[in-house]
Amino acid sequence: MSRVVLVTTSSFGQKQAPELLALAEAGIELRYNPFGRRLTEAEALELFAGADPVGVVAGVEPLTARVLEAAPGLKAVARCGTGLDSVDLAAAERLGIKVSNTPDAPAAAVSELAMALIFAALRRVAEADRAIRAGAWKPQTGGLLAARSVGVVGLGRIGRRVASFLRPYGGRILGYDPYPGAEVPGVEMVPLDRLIAEADIITLHAPPGAVRLGAAEFAAMRKGAIVVNTARGDLIDEAALHDALSSGHLGGAGLDVFQEEPYRGPLTALETVVMTAHMGSYAAEARALQETEAARNLLEDLRRLGLLP
């Protein structure tokens, strides 16, 4: 049996987590991401082939069929975070690899960042900051959240938290979930096209591929609407968003995720866009919790499989 566990998530900080120490005490060698950033498929392939790990604590690097097949001894992948779209689940099942995630740990951190981006875009915080740094004292006129209708797209763990944060402000909250039957206190559930047409602010919390906002959707939004995305980059057509913002039809955007990361595209030139570096889960407390949970998941799976005492 392979005696290596790879920790491929780029910012793993809980290197003294009891679960990882238990792996080390059982004779498992721990190897960490040597790049300090998200791995490409080619880099992951090289690491997996070289180490042939029995287990992996993974981030958002692409664990494609090629990568998984490069490690014949691999038995368990513990994803550090919520989404599993970075893992080829069909290939994992075919290869007999157990896959787990940590859906609860990041929810508080991502939902709080979503609220931060809503306020930053609505009150034009980044624009005011940049103006002062450039030597201009120019108060920016924004808007009140209480006077806005907010559409929450995706009402899982994170979307529900965002809705709970919004309720005390007293504005109208619209909700759409790709899975039928979702009901949330204080949220008016509507079809997606209605939410798009009636919301002043739209915040995305849907899984990959569940929705996609493109030119038609942006055109259907209210003039001055704000779009926030802390879910996945593929939920938005970035070129269409750029056009809608440049024309003045949309009033702003708050983006934590992008189709290609690190993002270096034309949205960086627009004053009305607030951007963060895919850091929704990067609150110290939440990050520590999800890393510990991922390490625990991996330890428990390896024990269930009879690979550890």
Image: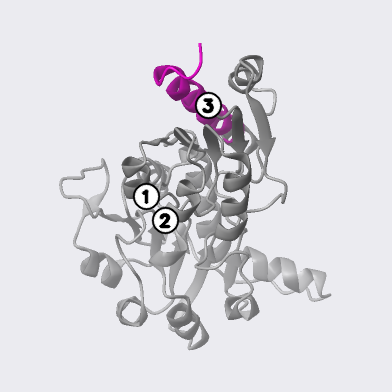
Which element carries disc 3, helix, strand or loop?
Answer: loop
Q: Which residue is mark 2?
A: 146
Residue at image x 68%, y 36%?
A: 31
Name the image quarter holding residue 17.
Answer: top right
Measured from the top left, where is residue 98 in percent x and y? 39, 34
Q: Which residue is mark 1?
A: 170
Residue 300 covered by magenta stretch: yes
Taking 122 as reference, is 82 above or below it? above
- Residue kind at label 1, given as amino acid type: Gly
Tell me if mark 3 has few (under 14), some (14-19) or many (20+) residues whose alpha carbon lies within 10 angstroms of its own: few
> Seen from this angle, which residue lies furthest left?
181
Q: Which residues are magenta?
A: 287-309
Q: Which mark is residue 1?
A: 3
Measured from the top left, where is residue 45 in percent x and y? 56, 53
- Residue kind at label 3, given as amino acid type: Met
Residue at image x 44%, y 67%?
A: 227
